[in-house]
Amino acid sequence: MVSRRSVLATLGATGALLLLPNRASAAVSRAVSVAELTRQSRVVLLGEPVEVYSQWQTVGQRRRIVTFTRVVTAEGVVGDAESEVLIQTLGGRVGDIGQIVHGEAALKLHEPSLLFLQDSPEGITRVTAMAQGHYRVLAERGGAPRLAPSRELGTLLPGKGVAAVQALRGRTFPEARDLIVQARLR
């Protein structure tokens, strides 16, 4: 038999949980294929972020925090990969203020990544299709490292063909490299 006290305690706990704030994310993008990512990119490379810094900058007509990540190239896949590249992403932390841009690539220091990169008209290197152009290379216990999507990848609406995220997730770097090179030849 359930006591009145336990019912009231359960209702109170449930009500308190409903009042807690939830993390909201609002990134919705059209999924792009490996062929689209490759075609839109100046270079595709395997690299490791070795330095990260953020600063305030005017983007469009608003002040935003942008992050610059210096990436050392381990291997070029497509295009002329420099030995290192400076990549700009939106969001970051300056002092006590942080900005998160859902759907933007989230590069992490010393975490190897497969990166699809393009240059803006201003000559700034950015990740092609934001988070869809960034794949973390994660070590597997007892196996070869495998690709995982960027942490801030938002919801993807269907695009043309198989989404790059579906095609590349869980693959080893050599498998992904072969897919990208094949996509480039089409």
Image (cartoon, rainbow, N blue to C red):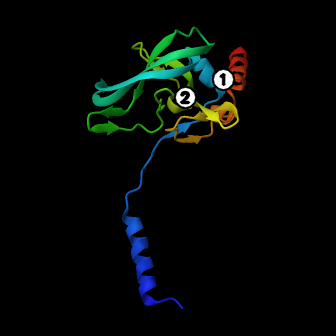
Residue 133 pos. (x, y %): 55, 27
Q: Which residue is at a point 68% across and 21% down the rendered structure image?
A: 177
Whole-number angstrom distance, CA of label 2 to CA of label 1: 15 Å
Which residue carries the number 1 mark? 35
Instruction: Name which residue type carries label 1.
Output: Ala
Neighbor class of circle 2 (other Cα within 10 Å; few <14, some 14-19, many 20+) is many
Any part of residue 56 in sight:
yes
Left or right for 26, reference 114: left
> Which structural element holds mark 1?
helix
Circle nearer the N terminus (2, 1): 1
Quarter assignment of residue 16: bottom left
Image quadrant containing the C terminus: top right
Vertical order, 70 against 98 (above or below): above
Instruction: Name which residue type carries label 2.
Output: His
Which residue carries the number 2 mark? 134
Q: Mark number for residue 174?
A: none
Quarter assignment of residue 59: top left
Residue farthest to the bottom, as pictured: 1
**Is 145 in front, or is 124?**
145
